[in-house]
Amino acid sequence: MTAKLSYAIAGPMPEITTKPRTSTKPKVERPKLYKVILVNDDFTPREFVVTVLKAEFKLSEDQAHRVMITAHRRGVCVVAVFTRDVAETKAARATDAGKAKGYPLMFTTEPEE
Ligand code: TYC
């Protein structure tokens, strides 16, 4: 006896397959930035403030003088922005530089909008 092969017209139910996501949406969130703020006081010598700004924040003589004089006139001046860790470390180091000389020089940090 010869076996007869029979074929259904519609064929098998198509399988619905979904391709697994191999490439995911790139999630590159930019880190929040923090401002380092120079606060004025009545005791720290101007030239010392300029020296600290140049040493800790790599400002030029001209930039450092502008930042110092802005804080002197207005009370505060934004020095620069960094990631949180860097901003806090630099603000602490710059504040400590004043403290080491007996000056009340102060740098603070605050998050950008
Ligand atoms: N006001 C200080 C003075 O007259 C100078 C100064 C400027 C100090 C800016 C701090 O953040 C400062 N000697």
Image (cartoon, rainbow, N blue to C red):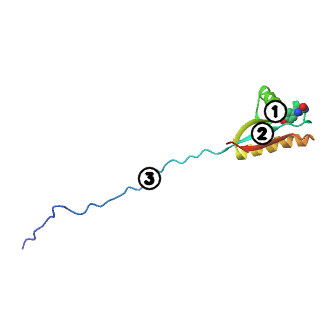
Which numbered disc covers residue 41?
none
Callout 3 environment at 10 Å: few (<14), some (14 to 19), or many (20+)? few
Callout 2 environment at 10 Å: few (<14), some (14 to 19), or many (20+)? many
The amino acid pointed to by label 1 is Arg
- How far apart, in angstroms, are the residues tagged by discs 3 and 1? 55 Å
Q: Nearer the viewer, mark 1 or mark 2?
A: 1
Disc 3 and disc 1 in contact, CB within 8 angstroms: no
- How far apart, in angstroms, are the residues tagged by discs 1 and 2? 12 Å
Q: Residue at x 87, y 39 (%)?
A: 105
The amino acid pointed to by label 2 is Ile
Q: Which residue is mark 1?
A: 74
Where residue 39 sits in the image (x, y, percent)? 83, 38
Q: Nearer the viewer, mark 3 or mark 1?
A: 1
Which numbered disc covers residue 22?
3
Mark 3 lies on a secondary structure that is loop
Where residue 14 sits in the image (x, y, percent)? 26, 60
Q: Residue at x 81, y 33 (%)?
A: 74
